[in-house]
Image: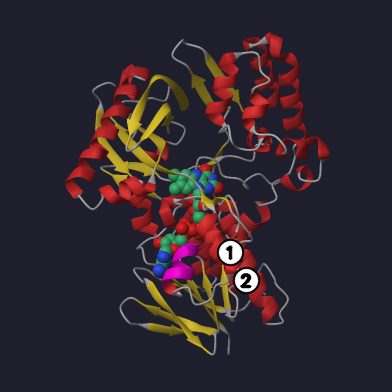
């Protein structure tokens, strides 16, 4: 008889764990509280418009990428079309200066030199570092690239003479981040490993769900796990909110780490390291997403603009001095022909929105206010769309938490983890964790690889050789 694995969560990590579990001869069942797969990798439809809530850059669709084989194994790339952009973003300031952050580093270098010839030395240094960065595994062993771990983006950018280039680059990569992260981002685009999957995030997740079901996996939707069944400090199955139980030989939790450790397991299996991690670490930022459905074709307009503001906006309890406008004109599947989808993501504070949510009227008003402010800026930059907005949708950090349980609405997991991140818990057998909370900086490749890793660990415990296809 096959051994059974109960997997909590049908986000990308849970789906990946499911696929690899099936490939390795286990009977797996995924329990997902929502009614769709994908978790944070999602999209939603409003009056014929699809508003995408996740992917801006997907790593791994390029055959040279270290994630390519794994995405292929879980069926994510099958029959999919991908868009590689010509530029990452167009950064514009109120004085009319414009930096086009081309994905091709030669083109970007030329453009930067045109904008600021006196910055030739630092521009060449940046371009050379980006050209050298072929793969994170090689880059992390290369002293010429590792030196950028020793300085921040702020330190690096300070060396530019052009105040506009300083301002523009800081709007792309936060000042306090390591300079390595700026080079990494530019390199990933230059290596054509940061693309958009046509159809969007939910459609992408559905591909993996399809593969999982084809492999014989089972998923229960609207099945919220409230308890892990424990016998002699070993995970023996799960219990759902409606009281149903499912016995298993192993349990993999592919959901939010805080929920797993402190809510479901009630802090029973922790040590000082885990406590410190969850108490002192910085989680990734969270945002408000404003999405617009527009009765106007914006395909002749730029697809991604960052407008630097003269007067900062106040969204929630934060001031923001830049507004990103993403025009999804490169994907015709997201709305009827002749129409357009536009979104913005603005960093904000989870606690503020969580508190406001208790007063539904005030929460609704604040969402409306945020949308109004964004629309003013959007219509000024894209006058063609003025008066043609027919759908407005606002998702706040509370929305992420409500739909996926994600701790503090932090949709990329840890930013600066204060300690080792666990994938198992002390004194608790038969139990593994996967997903963005088990590796720093989160993201879809992390979800994929940690889902895969959780099955490798199960195989190891079980004395089996791990494999990546059915035999
Ligand atoms: C706005 C935004 C932009 C992003 N942009 C990118 C990008 O461009 N590139 C990139 O790589 N990544 C991006 N990400 C991050 C990426 O989406 C996440 O890091 C990744 O999807 C996390 O996957 P996961 O499987 O670890 O967790 P999740 O997606 O959180 O999945 C967990 C699943 O578990 C379910 N669940 C939770 N609690 C329970 C319970 N008790 N019982 C049953 N089910 C439960 C949830 O409903 C969810 O489906 C973005 C995210 C957002 C929101």
Q: Position of residue 397 (x, y in %)?
A: 37, 48
- Label placed on residue 455: 2
Give the CA separation, mark 2 to mark 1: 7 Å
Q: Position of residue 380 (x, y in %)?
A: 33, 18
Q: Quadrant of residue 154?
A: top right
Question: Which residue is painted at 56% across and 27% down in the image?
Answer: 170
Q: Quadrant of residue 273?
A: bottom right
Q: Please, is residue 194 above or below residue 422 in the view?
A: above
Question: Which residue is painted at 64% across and 40% down in the image?
Answer: 193
Instruction: Decide: few, some or many residues near mark 2? Use Cα within 10 Å; few <14, some 14-19, many ≥20.
Output: many
Q: Please, is residue 264 above or below residue 287 in the view?
A: below
Quadrant housing the N terminus: bottom right
Q: Is residue 252 magenta?
A: no
Q: Secondary structure at mark 1?
A: helix
For the record, the magenta segment spans 255-263
Q: Is residue 265 left or right of residue 281?
A: left
Q: Label 1 belongs to which residue?
A: 451
Observer-nearest residue: 39 or 84? 39
Q: Is residue 259 magenta?
A: yes
Q: Is any atom of residue 200 visible in this view?
A: no
């Amino acid at each position: 008889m096959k051994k059974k694995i109960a997997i909590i969560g049908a986000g990308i990590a849970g789906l990946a764990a499911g696929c690899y579990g099936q490939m390795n001869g286990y009977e797996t069942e995924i329990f997902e509280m929502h009614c769709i797969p994908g978790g944070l990798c999602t999209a939603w439809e409003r009056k014929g418009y699809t508003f995408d809530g996740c992917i801006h850059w997907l790593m791994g669709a390029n055959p040279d990428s270290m994630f390519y084989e794994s995405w292929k194994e879980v069926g994510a790339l099958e029959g999919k079309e991908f868009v590689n952009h010509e530029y990452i973003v167009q950064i514009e300031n109120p004085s009319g200066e414009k930096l086009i952050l081309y994905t091709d580093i030669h083109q970007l270098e030329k453009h930067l030199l045109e904008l600021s010839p006196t910055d030739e030395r630092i521009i060449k240094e940046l371009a050379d570092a980006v050209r050298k960065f072929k793969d994170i595994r090689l880059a992390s062993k290369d002293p010429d690239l590792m030196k950028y771990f020793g300085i921040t983006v702020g330190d690096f950018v300070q060396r530019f003479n052009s105040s506009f280039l300083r301002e523009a680059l800081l709007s792309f990569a936060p000042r306090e981040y390591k300079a390595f992260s700026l080079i990494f981002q530019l390199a990933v685009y230059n290596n054509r490993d940061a693309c958009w999957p046509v159809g969007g995030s939910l459609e992408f997740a559905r591909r993996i769900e399809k593969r999982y079901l084809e492999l014989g996996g089972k998923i229960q939707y609207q099945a919220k796990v409230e308890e892990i069944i424990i016998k002699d400090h070993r995970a023996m199955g799960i219990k759902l909110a409606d009281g149903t139980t499912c016995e298993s030989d192993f349990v993999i939790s592919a959901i939010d780490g805080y929920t797993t450790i402190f809510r479901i397991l009630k802090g029973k299996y922790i040590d000082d390291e885990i406590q410190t991690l969850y108490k002192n670490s910085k989680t990734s930022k969270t945002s408000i997403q404003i999405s617009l459905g527009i009765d106007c074709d914006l395909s002749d307009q730029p697809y991604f603009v960052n407008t630097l503001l003269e007067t900062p906006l106040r969204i929630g309890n934060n001031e923001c001095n830049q507004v990103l406008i993403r025009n999804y004109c490169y994907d015709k599947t997201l709305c009827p022909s002749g129409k357009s989808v536009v979104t913005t993501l603005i960093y904000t504070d989870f606690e503020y929105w969580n508190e406001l949510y208790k007063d539904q009227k005030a929460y609704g008003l604040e969402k409306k206010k945020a949308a109004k402010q964004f629309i003013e800026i959007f219509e000024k930059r894209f006058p063609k769309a003025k008066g043609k907005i027919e759908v407005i949708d606002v998702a706040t950090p509370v929305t992420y938490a409500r739909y996926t349980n994600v701790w503090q609405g932090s949709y990329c997991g840890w930013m600066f983890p204060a300690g080792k991140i666990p994938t198992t818990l002390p004194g608790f057998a038969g139990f593994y964790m996967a997903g963005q909370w088990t590796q720093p900086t989160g993201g879809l490749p992390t979800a994929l690889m940690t889902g895969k890793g959780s099955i490798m660990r199960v195989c190891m415990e079980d004395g089996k050789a791990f494999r990546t296809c059915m035999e």
